[in-house]
Every structure is written in C-alpha cells, then in structure tokens.
Amino acid sequence: MNGIHDLGGMHGFGPIDIDPEQPLFRNDWERRVFALFFGCAPHGFFNLDEFRHAVERMDAAEYLELSYYEHWLHAYETLLVGNGAITAEEYATRCAEIAQEAG
Amino acid sequence: MDILTPDLVPGMLANGATTRVDVDAPLRFKVGDEIVVRNLNPTGHTRLPRYLRGKRGVVEHAHGVFIFPDTHAHHKGEKPQHVYGVRFSMIELWGDGASPRDCCIVDVFDDYMDPL
C-alpha cells in the first residue's frame, strides 16, 4: 500500500540518528512490547507480514507522532482484538486496572 | 501450538524470525541479469518500496527462497519465491543530481521484477 511507512526518499524528517551507542530500549515498557512479538507470532496469533501490515495501516498522522515500539503496540492491539484472541472490553478493562495500580 | 520456552529465544533473536523456507522455486534471474521493477501499487501489504517502481537494476545476489509477504500478510498463501539483491545506481533512483559513484542494493522479491 502507498502508506506513510514508506518513507524512502522523502525530505523533511531531519538527520538519521546513527549513534551506535544509542540504547536498544529507551523505556522499560519497550522491552515487554518487543518480547510480546515472540510470545505471539510463533504461536499462530499472527504472522510477521500481517504484523508489519498492521503498522502500515495506522492513521498517517498518528504514525508520524508515535515512537517505534508504540507502532508495535498498536499492531498487537489491532491484530489480537481483530482475530478475537482478546476482546476490546478485556483490553480496556486490563488497561484501566493497570492504570489504577500505578496510581 | 508450540510453547515459547527460554531456550528458543536466542535462536529467534539471532535469525530475526526469518521467513526463509527450504522449498524449490523457479530461479528466473541470475547474477548479472538486468531487470526492471514492475510498477505495482497494491492496496495491501508489500515489501516493494515506492522509490523502486519502474527502476532498472542489475542482479547482484540470489539470496534463496522466502515466503512472499504480499500474499502471506493476507492469508493468501506462502507463495515461496526467490529474493535477489539488486543494484540500482543512485542516478537511476534519484536523477541526474545524484552521485554517479554511488549505488543502492535492495532485496527484491521475484514477483516484483521483469527481465529488461
């Protein structure tokens, strides 16, 4: 698809960060988001290609505003709710519980 | 359904969840062949970057056979096929203002290419 993810050759995004010392994860939650891929994809919840496509189908403005692992999280939400592994209600309920636990 | 156990994790991380498959598929191109990329505008998933459409290149590597993402993403089959490393000159990709010394090698699925 001619999506916002296909940025090759576009101008206006500033320099590419090629610092080899940059951290693998900038926030602790990103480790969990990364690991969740290996907890889902090899077990048939979705495949690598539909995972990528779920990122590509994000709203274009939202895509540009969110970080790399927020794209991943968005894909999990789309796919796992979409294929019925979890319901939107279950997800919203658990998010609210976690928010409450965190105060 | 397989259970994810800790001993499986290093291998998964090392191969990046590869989609390489051990099946035969027609090898339509060989190293040195000149190709042109098809002008494809699918509404679904593709691994063909926009900037390659209609561009001419030369096959540098034959990487082997991989699952075709364009069908696999939509549960339309694995359609295993060869992937080639194709060299494109920067002038071909970006016009006369680009460096004549530079090139870009992109991995391209068989379905994206025609012989030139």
Image (tube, rainbow, N blue to C red):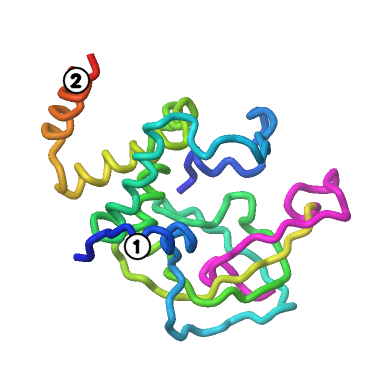
Pointer 1: what residue?
B7
- Mark 2 Cα within 10 Å, few/some/many (few <14, many 20+)? few
Q: Could you tell me which chain the residue with mark 2 belongs to?
A: A
The reply, left or right, for residue B39 in relation to residue A41 is: right
Residue A102, image x and y in percent?
24, 18
Name the residue type under label 1.
Asp
Badge 1 crowding class, 10 Å Cα cut-off, few under 14, some 14 to 19, many 20 or more, is few
**On-image quarter of the C terminus of chain B:** bottom right
Depth check: B21 or B85 in front?
A: B21
Q: Residue furthest top?
A: A103
Q: Amino acid at mark 2?
A: Glu
> Residue A36 shows which numbered tag?
none
Q: Position of residue B48 (x, y in %)?
A: 54, 57
Is residue B14 positioned above or below A71 on the image? Answer: below
The residue located at (73%, 56%) in the rendering is: B104
Mark 2–mark 1 Cα distance, whole angstroms, equals 32 Å
Per the image, the residue denoted by label 2 is A101
**Residue furthest front as drawn:** B7
Q: Secondary structure at mark 2?
A: helix
Side of A95 relative to B65 (left or right):
left
Instruction: Give the magenta part as a residue range.
Output: B91-116
Residue B88 percent across, percent down from the top left: 73, 60
Q: Quadrant of the N terminus of chain B?
A: bottom left
